[in-house]
Amino acid sequence: MVDIHIDYLGELHCRAEHGPSRKLLETDAPVDNHGRGESFSPTDLLATALGTCMATVMGIKARARGFDLEGMHVHVKKLMTTSQPRRVARLEVSLRVPVQVGERAGEAGRAELEHAANTCPVRLSLLDAIEVPVVFDWELR
């Protein structure tokens, strides 16, 4: 169990504290929803959670196989609905893995890492109402 403590600061800003580490992060409403867009929005954090969760579980699997994913880049593009109710409609994920990692992992390892990413806790927690296309680029040319 992890406690997250959140204070509403006014003007559509919140500050959240991660209980175990005491690290802080702030959110702001996006410009297209009455905010100033000065920080991550709550739905931006959802997209961030997905990308970082995928990278983290892949990193755990890679470490167990004796290599590191350092240099991997994950890009998540968040698309909101255009009609009410306002919600995340689609999270497009692109993972670019350095060529040396792809070579070291081999075909079976790449499949294992892709499975780990696609079954990370955040991905499994998302409703089917959110489309989540995922593309892996192993830089194997």
Image: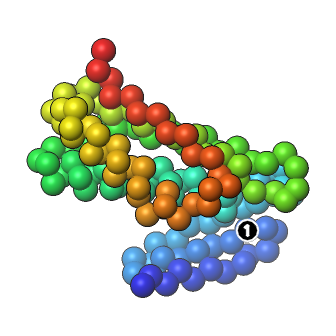
Nearest the camera: 3 or 1? Answer: 1
Which image quarter holds the C terminus?
top left
Above or below: residue 4 compared with residue 84? below
Query: What residue is disc 1 on?
Result: 13
Residue 96: x percent and y percent?
Answer: 39, 32
Residue at image x 23%, y 52%? 61
Total marks shown come to 1
Residue 118: x percent and y percent?
Answer: 42, 50
Above or below: residue 38 compared with residue 92? below
Residue 114 occupies quadrant: top left
In this picture, residue 95 sits left or right of residue 130:
left
Residue 119: x percent and y percent?
Answer: 41, 55
How packed is label 1: few (under 14 Cα within 10 Å), some, or many (20 or more)? some
Say whether residue 26 is visible. yes
Say whether residue 101 is visible. no
Residue at image x 35%, y 48%? 115
In this picture, residue 105 sits left or right of residue 33:
left
